[in-house]
């Protein structure tokens, strides 16, 4: 068995798919894995995969041209999932590789995505569902704060890499605002300049001190909101367990009205 070890990213996985297909080692003899394996298997050869923008582009073009955008979006969402590979379920890179192979053999990407009896396709379904759920939660719970320079800023800690979805959504909703969304988990940031398209970049150069400097208006509005939040609460009907069901506790640190209780 040949195991192609990929970086846990879209570029890393698609580069692995490209190298595996180009290797001519026989698809039945190949498996893809994200990250260094915890336990190495006997009689298996591990082949490291270097992420390549060129290979990624070729794989994307092939998928889109042959199977359409809907198939590509499902593969993309699966690749963005942050669900850990614990050995109990198929690695997402291997699921993506096998699903693409099924589509190439069948010639119909939509038909393949409906074949939930196939373990790889069902795994793609699970990963897409997790990514979509995470994106929906952050669309509901994300809070912007106004910095002293007038930029709207938000911090998130998602399990899955949902920043592209959020950046696309808020670019459409807030086209004339300057805003930034910082994904502290994946150390990436979406930057949007008024009337322009957003840009995704590495957060290594982000000034962590500057993003904590709120404008005077922001401080006042936050006080007003917290006062309103406290006054509409009915003391005798407080239900922390229900509150955690409505807004899971892992979101509290990024939610101004609940950060006090996180």
Image (cartoon, rainbow, N blue to C red):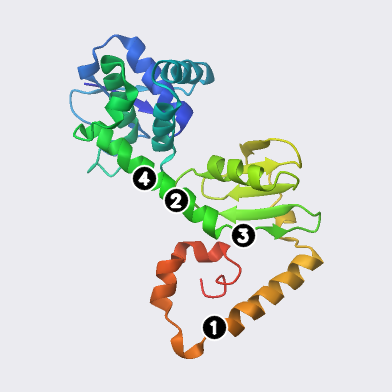
Horizontal side of residue 162 vs 74, given as left or right:
right
Image height check: is 186 above or below 70?
below
- Mark 1 neighbour density, 10 Å: few (under 14) some (14–19) many (20 or more): few
The earlier-in-sequence mark between 2 and 4 is 4
Residue of label 3: 143
Residue drawn at the location 35% of the way across and 27% of the way down? 5
Residue drawn at the location 75% of the way across and 61% of the way down? 213
Horizontal side of residue 198 vs 123, given as left or right:
right
Q: Quadrant of the N terminus?
A: top left
Q: Which structural element holds mark 1? A: loop
- Mark 2 neighbour density, 10 Å: few (under 14) some (14–19) many (20 or more): some
- Mark 3 neighbour density, 10 Å: few (under 14) some (14–19) many (20 or more): some
Residue of label 4: 129
Q: Are marks 4 and 3 in contact (CB under 8 Å)?
A: no
Q: Are marks 3 and 1 in contact (CB under 8 Å)?
A: no
The earlier-in-sequence mark between 4 and 1 is 4
What numbered label is drawn on residue 155?
Answer: none
Residue of label 2: 134
How far from the left and from the top, in percent, is residue 143? 61, 59
Residue of label 1: 233
Q: For this rendering, which residue is in front, 236 or 217?
A: 236
Image height check: is 3 above or below 234?
above
Q: Residue furthest bottom?
A: 236
Residue drawn at the location 41% of the way across and 41% of the way down? 81
Figure quadrant of residue 101: top left
């Amino acid at each position: 068995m040949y195991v192609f070890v990929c970086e846990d990213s879209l570029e890393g996985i698609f580069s692995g798919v490209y190298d595996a297909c180009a290797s001519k080692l026989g698809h039945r003899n190949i498996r893809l894995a994200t990250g260094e394996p915890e336990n190495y298997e006997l009689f298996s050869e591990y082949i490291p995969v270097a992420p390549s923008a060129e290979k990624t582009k070729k794989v994307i073009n092939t998928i889109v041209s042959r199977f359409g955008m809907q198939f590509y979006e499902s593969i993309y969402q699966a690749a963005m999932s942050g669900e850990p590979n614990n050995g109990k379920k198929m690695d997402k890179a291997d699921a993506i590789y096998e699903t693409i192979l099924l589509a190439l053999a069948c010639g119909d990407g939509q038909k393949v995505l409906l074949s939930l009896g196939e373990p790889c396709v069902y795994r793609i379904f699970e990963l897409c569902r997790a990514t979509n759920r995470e994106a929906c939660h952050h669309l509901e719970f994300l809070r912007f704060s106004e910095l002293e320079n007038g930029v709207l800023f938000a911090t998130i800690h998602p399990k899955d890499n949902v920043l592209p979805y959020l950046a696309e959504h808020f670019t459409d909703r807030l086209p004339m605002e300057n805003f930034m969304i910082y994904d502290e988990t994946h150390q990436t940031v979406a930057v949007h300049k008024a009337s322009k398209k957003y840009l995704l970049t590495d957060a290594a150069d982000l000034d962590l001190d500057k993003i904590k400097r709120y404008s005077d208006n922001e401080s006042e509005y936050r006080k007003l909101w917290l006062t309103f939040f406290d006054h509409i609460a009915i003391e005798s009907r407080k239900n922390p367990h229900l509150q955690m069901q409505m807004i899971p506790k892992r979101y509290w640190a990024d939610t101004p009205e609940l950060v006090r209780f996180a």
